[in-house]
Amino acid sequence: MCAKYLFMLCLLAYSAEAQIKIFNVKDYGASADGSTDNSVAFVKAWSDACKWKGDTNVLIPEGTYMLRSVIFNGPCNGAITFQINGVLKAPVDPALLADQKWINFRYVDKLTVNGGGTVDGQGTATRQKCQNDSCQILFTSMDLDFITNGRIENLHSFDSKGGHFIVFGSENMTFTNLSLISPANNRNTDGIKISHTNGINITSVTIGTGDDCVAMISGAKKVRITDVFCGPGHGISVGSLGGGNPLELPVEDIVVKNCTFNGSSNGVQIKTWPFPLKTPLKVSNFTYEDIIMINVQNPIIINQQYCPEHNCDLSKSSHVQISNVSYQNIRGSSATDIAVSFNCSKEMPCQDVTVDDIDLLSSGGKGRQELSNYCFNVKGSSYGKQIPPSCVPSYKFSSTPLPN
């Protein structure tokens, strides 16, 4: 009987310890009036939660909370959830923000950000305010630096000033059940940008922006992107890479599957600068599979003469070596006459590029016969259905110069 009683006491003690401690920002003086700066209250609630010996929840109840730039630092003593039930609103005046960041989580293990609420960057209002000034406007809505075992889920990010999410130096993160929306004419509003990070899962996410829906740059590895809807936007991109940064790292092991692009300027793209590097950069092992294109300007594109400002010396070759890239079961419609464009480096041709079951027609009602593909310095092979006919020959180079 005594032993049973002691066991029950231990079980109750364990259950109490296992309960998640809630830190409500309103208990720290936060005001949901949409105009009061709540950064001090939010940081204090986070600090107490982070110090707590156990799992915690920083709760933002319903309501609208104005927030200047905030940094939520770790490490913490347990798993921590930042639960946004309400709306977080950035100030319109960019002078009230700092370091090109709005909400910044750093050095946290087992971070979850969720709650069904909204992160409102007020980017359009800021651009209108700054259109005649030289003020800095490209503030990321949420930066995730050096996060391990993180999960960002069930949120809406709206009208970001710059990018919606930037992930840097992190490992083992999941983004799911998100909507990331910015006006198509608001430039540099990437959905999710990933660098120096290993192990990212992006699934069930809707993205409409004025830049890349997902961008993978230096050091992005082991990225899995599934069930993503992109449009408007510039597509799901690797790069840009090879612009001369000597610290740039390879990008490798990327899978994009079961995604839909609607009205985007690009579908799946790899972009590198025409710039000579002392040490060539290698990017490899990309799989694009089961993808639908709807009225996409460049459904499948490798561009190793990427130069958006048209101020590059195009006689130079990109020193980024692209290899082992697979495109399989990609279907839908192109808004231009080129369905597939592989414009590879003159000095470092693309290697082991495979196209398998491609079926792309014109979205302008011209029919399949009016589309064509373009290849320059690409080595690989094609299989299955190829509409329009593939320009990737088996184990031969295509060296047709790029048309003017």
Image (tube, rainbow, N blue to C red):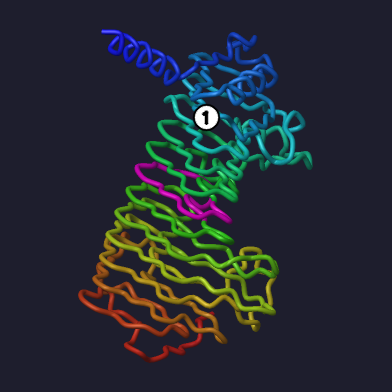
- Residue 9: x and y in percent read 37, 11
**Magenta span main SS:** strand
Which residue is depicted at the point 52% across and 65% down? Answer: 251
Q: What stretch is highlighted in magenta?
A: 194-215
Residue 306 horizontal/vertical position (percent): 58, 69
The N terminus: image quadrant: top left
Residue shown at 42%/21% (left/top)? 18
Specify whether residue 79 is painted magenta: no
The residue drawn where x is 62% and y is 33% is 103
Q: Taking 355 as reference, is 233 left or right?
A: right
Residue 140 locus on image (x, y percent): 62, 40
Which secondary structure, mark 1?
loop
Give the position of the C terminus as an image quadrant: bottom right
Residue 301 in which image quadrant: bottom left
- Viewed as shown, does residue 29 lie left or right of 113? right
In-front residue for pair 226/156: 226
395 to 190, vertically: above or below = below
Residue that lies at the very extreme toward the front in this rendered image = 2
Q: In this view, does 147 lie above or below 96?
A: below
- Residue type at mark 1 is Gly
Q: Which of 317 and 247 is in front in this view?
A: 247
Report the residue marked by disc 1: 78
Asked if residue 204 is among those painted magenta in the image, a careful observer would answer yes
Percent x, y of residue 236? 45, 56
Considering only vertical position in the picture, is 3 above or below 220? Answer: above
Q: Residue 66's quadrant in the figure?
A: top right
Q: Residue at x 50, y 79 (%)?
A: 344
